[in-house]
Image: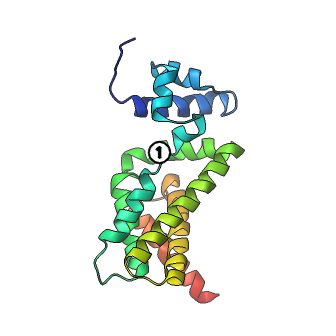
Amino acid sequence: MARWQPNASDRLVLAALELFEERGYEATTVVGIAERAGLTKSTFFRHFPDKREVLFGGDTMAGMLAAGVIAAPSDATPSAAIAHALDAVGREVFTAERREFGARRQAVIDAAPELREREALKGLGLTAAMREALERRGVAALTARVAAELGALALTIGYERWIRGADEDGFGVVARRALEDLREAGAAC
């Protein structure tokens, strides 16, 4: 085995996903993931702290959402700033090429309670990142919290709709539609 091979992180993610699908999350080991990727256990731990983190990408998305909120036009409403952030995530992370991977990843998460718990914790972090970014833009705390919570729900609903692939729209369009659906549902309450 070569000492260094490119794309180790991506190879580990794909190997983990394949093994989780084949054997289940509980029956898959870090050693097995590393071997499937053609890497060592120590290489795995240079990229991920444990096997559940291999499907969650660290804090990348939280940073991307926060940056998207901050980069929104200065006159954007809190909701429009959230939509801007969702668009950014769609351009950078949830690309058409990753739709099938996303569906496979979600099926693995749905089948494992430990991964569902991790996904819920990640969702809290994404919500906090958007709320803090809105507050940095000068949005009042309660308004920032409500907008961030709606944004997180739109992200979740948009992702669910997007991975099902019912239409060919990109993630940003699907997530914006989910955000609008949530605003309409809130107005009907």
Q: Which residue is at 42% across, 33% downward?
A: 9
Element type at mark 1: loop
Q: Position of residue 70 (x, y in %)?
A: 34, 70
| Residue at position x 48%, y 77% in the image | 180
User: Can you say whether 102 is above or below 36 in the image?
Assistant: below
Find residue 62 and report its horizontal and vertical position in percent: 45, 58
Residue at 42% of width from left, 51% of height from top?
60
Q: Quadrant of residue 74?
A: bottom left
Quadrant position of residue 77: bottom left
Q: Left or right: where does residue 6 sit relative to residue 99?
A: left
Q: How many marks?
A: 1
| Amino acid, disc 1 | Gly
Q: Nearer the viewer, residue 67 or 88?
A: 67
Give how far across and how far down residue 69 sits, in percent.
37, 70
Give whichever of 140, 21 is nearer the camera: 140
Eyeballing the image, is 18 above or below 155? above
Q: Where is mark 1, residue-wise?
A: 57
Query: Can you see residue 168?
Result: no
Residue 148: % across, % down: 51, 72
Above or below, comparing residue 152 to residue 37 in the picture? below
Instruction: Using the rendered view, name the quadrant where residue 189 is placed.
Output: bottom right
